[in-house]
Image: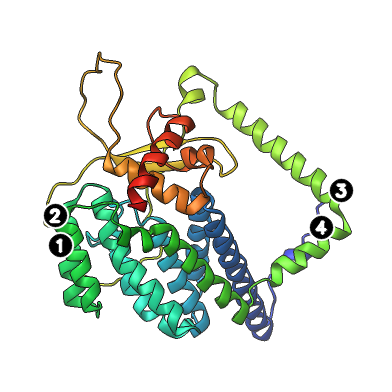
Amino acid sequence: MAADTSHLETPSTDDDMVEFSKVTTLCKRWMIDFHFVSMCRYFKEDKLEEFEKTVINLDSILESMPLINFELSQKRSIAGFVTRVMHGKDLDVHYDGVEVTPLISAINIWKLLKETVADDRLFEDITNLLYVQSVAVCLEMGQCSMASTVLKWLLKECEIPQNLGIKLSSIIKRKDTYHSYLLNFSFARLLDAILNFLQAYLKLHPCDFLLKAANKVVKACPDQLEDSGTEESETQSQSTSESTPVTQDNKETPVKRPKKKLLSTKNELLWKPESGKKPVVVLRRIGNGEDGDRLQSGAASPARPELKSRGKRKWTALQDLKIIEGVDRYGEGKWSKILLFYDFGNRTGVMLKDRWRILKKHLMN
């Protein structure tokens, strides 16, 4: 007996076709709202991998829309801005086909988002934090010439306050990567300020229709949904295990995912770093704790023989800055969490604690 497929038939009249397209457009808008809220949540929880997947889905749906209204255009710009900030410390990640740092690209989008920020003071705070961190990140990565180039670009293209420009110029000359001024305008503070902006935006533009609807369904039939999810998970797991033979190599080696140029704004920027050298990007997976696995990128250093000496290793300025920023972000004593988020080689929480005592005395003087 043939299966009944009448419910899959295409509407026969032009009027029905028009109505179906309207329904499809509305469904896409709901999905855009859902992915936008999810993106904000993953930004808050600092889950980079989930964040990137969500933004890719959001961008894909937006690309499929025949027309994008003003509100959807705003959400697209906000997603592009937040994406660049999330990659703010990855100087090898470029957007819009132009070799600029992620934060420089973020600054250009942030200028266009001024109307979306209800609080003028918050807009000014985030703007200044972007200015400072676009320079501070370069110093943190040991790119002093790039930091100088970024500052020149800021002074030329942006309305950067004069006293801020003078202060940053002095810090660059001294190569003071953990200057108190940079700590007051830290990357953690930038993330907190952007989170405040996202929360205020969501209050004015609610995007939780699908979440509320799903919440009602989950409350109505939690057992059925849980069983369905389990079966689906087991099916996917079985399918994967059957299609991919388990070997020692694919068991230990994580799948490498290329970096995406997410939500390009097609901005033509004139700024380029002075150095033409492009360092090799190395991806390494860090930890398996409450924040989940994380891909961290960094410039590959040339191979060198292992040191035979087992003496004390010197703390670098970059490591000191990571400790200070980690304490500022997670709190003093949260050494295991700081170790999970930042890379200190083989150092332990006790080592971080001892080093923090020294840094604390230095900062208080």
Which is more N-terminal, label 2 or label 4?
2
Which is more N-terminal, label 2 or label 3?
2
Which is more foreground, mark 3 or mark 2? 2
Q: Amino acid at mark 1?
A: Thr
Which is more N-terminal, label 1 or label 3?
1
Secondary element at tag 4: helix
Identify residue for label 4. Answer: 218
Mark 3–mark 2 distance (CA, rounded to whole Å): 59 Å
Q: Amino acid at mark 2?
A: Ser
- Picture residue at 62% right of the left edge, 66% below the top: 34
Secondary element at tag 3: helix
Say whether residue 136 is left or right of residue 286.
left
Camera-nearest residue between 63 and 267 = 267
Residue 271 in view in this figure = no
Q: Position of residue 280 (x, y in %)?
A: 24, 40
Query: Would you call the spot at circle 2 few (<14 residues within 10 Å), some (14-19), or many (20 or more)?
Result: some
Identify residue for label 3. Answer: 223
Q: Amino acid at mark 4?
A: Val
Identify residue for label 2. Answer: 145
- Picture residue at 30% right of the left edge, 71% below the top: 266
Dot label at residue 149: 1
- Picture residue at 41% right of the left edge, 41% below the top: 356
Query: Would you call the spot at circle 3 few (<14 residues within 10 Å), some (14-19), or many (20 or more)?
Result: few
Mark 2–mark 1 distance (CA, rounded to whole Å): 6 Å
Which is more foreground, mark 4 or mark 2? 2
